[in-house]
Amino acid sequence: MELKDIQNLIKFVAKSGASEVKLEMEDVKITIRTGDSGKPETTYYQQLPAMAPAPQPVTAAETTETAATPAAPEPAAPAAEEDSKYVTIKSPIIGTFYRKPSPDKPVFVEVGDSIGVGDVLCVIEAMKLFNEIESEVAGKIVKVLVDDSSPVEFDQPLFLVDPS
């Protein structure tokens, strides 16, 4: 059974609404379970604005020190507002991130490229299997957040996409 067949089977089971499917063949045994809600897990997430830290109790000594030094403006706040309008595509698995299908081929997507739902954005190698990561949103690539041939963790941001 090919990896593409397994991926298609997972998509089919997720769309069918079944909570669990078991498939046993001569050399392969697969169990697919869907979440409690019956919906498949998605590979993209909306980035939420950064939360301000909770205020801490201030002692009298700290009050005099902070009053003496003026507060610097926070430059990170506008960047967080700009990023909040973008969709962050995150890694669905742990592995090695590759922007190209092979070393002698061009990259899948560049910054500024328009993408559609189902377009391949990159591949992630996990246990000698190369998993194509497809877009679940249409838009324009704003930023590539990971270097080619870098290890990635589950749920690590890979791309910023402007869906507008």
Image (spheres, grey):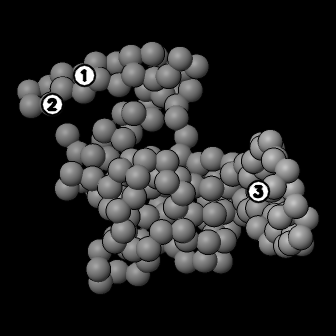
Dot 1 and dot 2 residues touching (CB under 8 Å)? yes
Q: Residues within 10 Å of mark 2 (few under 14, many from 20)?
A: few
The residue drawn where x is 89% and y is 70% is: 68
Residue 28, position in %: x, y? 15, 31
Residue 28: mark in rendering:
2
Residue 69, can we see it? Answer: yes
**Which of these two is toward me, 28 or 75?**
75
Tag 1 residue: 23
Where 152 sits versus 57, above or below? below
* Residue 163, image x, y percentages: 73, 59
Q: CA distance from mark 2 to mark 3?
A: 43 Å
In front of the other: label 3 or label 1?
A: 3
Which one is earlier in the sequence, the residue at label 3 or at label 1? Answer: 1
- Is 19 rendered above or below residue 145? above
Q: CA distance from mark 3 to mark 1?
A: 41 Å
**Residue 84 numbered mark, or none:** 3
Residue 30, position as x, y percentages in the image? 24, 27
- For disc 1, the neighbor class at 10 Å (few under 14, some 14 to 19, many from 20) is few
Quadrant, the C terminus: bottom right
Q: How many marks?
A: 3
Residue 40 in the image: state x and y as whole percent.
52, 31
